[in-house]
Image (spheres, grey):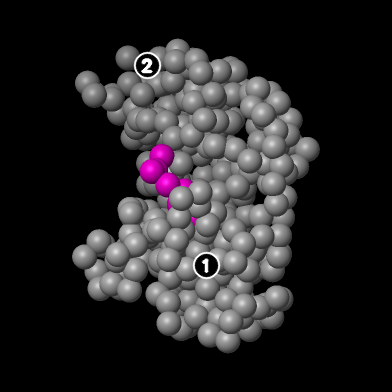
Amino acid sequence: MTYSTDKYILGAGIAGLIYGFYKQDFYIVSPEVGGQMKSNFNLGPRYLHDTEISRKFLTDISYPIEKSTIRIAYLNDQGWINQPDLEFRQKYYMKSRATNSLEGFDSSVMNSNKSEFDILLVDFDEIIKKLVTRIGAHRFIKGTVDALDDRNRILTVGMDKGHKYYTYSSIVSTIPINFLNRSMMPPITTKPFESYDMTYVFCDEFQDLEGFDYVYDLRTTTSWHRMTREKYGIVLDFFGRVEKVDKILDPIRPYIRDLKCLKNAQIISRDDIRDSGNVKFIGRYGTWNRTWKTEKVIEEAMK
């Protein structure tokens, strides 16, 4: 049996929820809500930049507006650096990807050398709860995207008791496009989607970050490449999958509270992904482009 409610958002991470909040005529398809935001700690630096669009969004969901400034630092074997040069940025790019190649290097690496930027203080867990409430339970379809036939406009959703089929006029996809590409007919591209897994380790504050909020760490004595100051500790970014038993963690083992491995966390952006037929792609993973930030999703959703 084929059902039809016309318009669907694929994915209920922060991007899908924001889009669903502003587009009330869309239904959201996802097995769960929260996406990568669902963790006991922040997986690296996650901020909502202070922009007119961001303030409008917080006002729309009745969330208090409170401004703060994030301070960024750079560290190598010689110590703290005020302004990293091109060589530092290139070496950091290679360390953070465990490579000797600069393929994929661009101006967005290391926040484009910023020393600070303004943010709005938010708890993303609270924002997700607010969005889910505002959207309403009746607009969520709990299931996985098993197939997307864009020629015939049929979406196949896998559920506990089999499949359901939905016809559509419009789809907005926020799920990782490498996954969707395998389920889509015709596929978006035959080219591979390149990415790397990452591991985030939450530790007690074993090093003084000297008032900085996060630090790009190029020291040859450390196996992590970035440190982010959290409310109750520090989050370290490691390239690849790191297990709790791995010796790479021995120097900080007494301080570790938790860790999480995240697949496809470090993506190599591509510019050849375009909206296809009746499907629109948004978000960092939905477009496979790391220049997408939450503010850009908000702006797109408000259109």
Residue placed furthest toward the bottom: 78
Q: Which mark is residue 208?
A: 1
Q: Which tag is nearer the camera, tag 1 or tag 2?
A: 1
Front residue of 146 and 293 = 293
Residue 40 sits in quarter? top left
Residue 213 sits in quarter? bottom right
Q: Position of residue 79 (x, y in %)?
A: 58, 82
Which stretch did the figure color magenta? Answer: 38-44
Task: Identify the main secondary structure in magenta.
Answer: loop
Q: Classify 5 as above or below 248.
A: above
Amino acid type of the residue that numbered disc 1 sits on in the rendered structure: Asp
> Horizontal placement of 97 versus 31: left or right?
right
> Horizontal placement of 196 versus 94: left or right?
left
Q: Which residue is mark 2?
A: 2
Q: Position of residue 124 (x, y in %)?
A: 53, 37
> Horizontal placement of 171 versus 61: left or right?
left
Residue 82 inside the magenta-drawn segment: no
Which residue is drawn at the image coordinates 52% and 45% (left, top)? 286
Q: Classify 240 as above or below 173.
A: below
